[in-house]
Image (cartoon, rainbow, N blue to C red):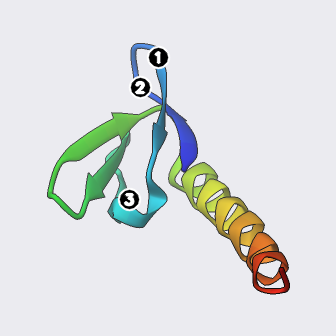
């Protein structure tokens, strides 16, 4: 999950596994696998960086869970 901000300033968490595309039109539009579209304040680069950071945390924890 990554934190994103709607244009009205409210924050919410987005399941990054559901992101299909990210466009800059100039607003950032995130299209989900359900075809639902979300307009957010973050740039495409910020979203990508957030998704990469989230997945790095998940994969770093994974090996620890297997060793138990």
Which label's residue is closer to the chain start, 1 or 3?
1
- Circle 1 sits on which residue? 10
Q: Which secondary structure lies at badge 2?
A: loop
Estimate the x, y position of residue 44 in percent, counting from the top left. 51, 54
- Circle 2 sits on which residue? 6
Estimate the x, y position of residue 64 in percent, counting from the top left. 84, 77
Give the numbered dot on residue 38.
none
Mark 3 neighbour class, 10 Å CA radius: few under 14, some 14 to 19, many 20 or more: some
Drawn side of residue 39 relative to residue 37, left or right:
right
Structural distance between the alpha carbons of marks 1 and 3: 19 Å
Estimate the x, y position of residue 2 in percent, counting from the top left. 57, 47
Structural distance between the alpha carbons of marks 2 and 1: 5 Å
Residue at (48, 15) in percent of width and height: 9
Structural distance between the alpha carbons of marks 3 and 2: 14 Å
Mark 1 neighbour class, 10 Å CA radius: few under 14, some 14 to 19, many 20 or more: few
Q: Which secondary structure lies at badge 3?
A: strand
Query: 53 or 45: which is nearer to us?
Result: 53
Q: Quadrant of the C terminus?
A: bottom right
Residue at (26, 57) in percent of width and height: 32
Callout 2–callout 1 Cβ contact below 8 Å: yes
Residue at (52, 36) in percent of width and height: 4
Estimate the x, y position of residue 36 in percent, counting from the top left. 17, 48
- What count of labels does the image hold? 3
Drawn side of residue 25 relative to residue 2, left or right:
left
- Residue 58 drawn above or below residue 14: below
- Residue 32 drawn above or below residue 60: above
Query: 65 or 2: which is nearer to us?
Result: 65
- The residue at the far front in this view is 68
Give the numbered dot on residue 22.
3
């Amino acid at each position: 999950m990554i934190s994103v901000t709607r244009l009205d300033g409210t924050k919410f968490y987005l399941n990054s596994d559901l992101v299909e595309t990210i466009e800059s039109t100039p607003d950032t539009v995130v299209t989900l696998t359900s075809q639902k579209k979300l307009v957010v304040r973050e740039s495409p680069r910020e979203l990508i960086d957030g998704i990469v950071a989230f997945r790095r945390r998940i994969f770093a924890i994974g090996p620890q869970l297997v060793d138990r």
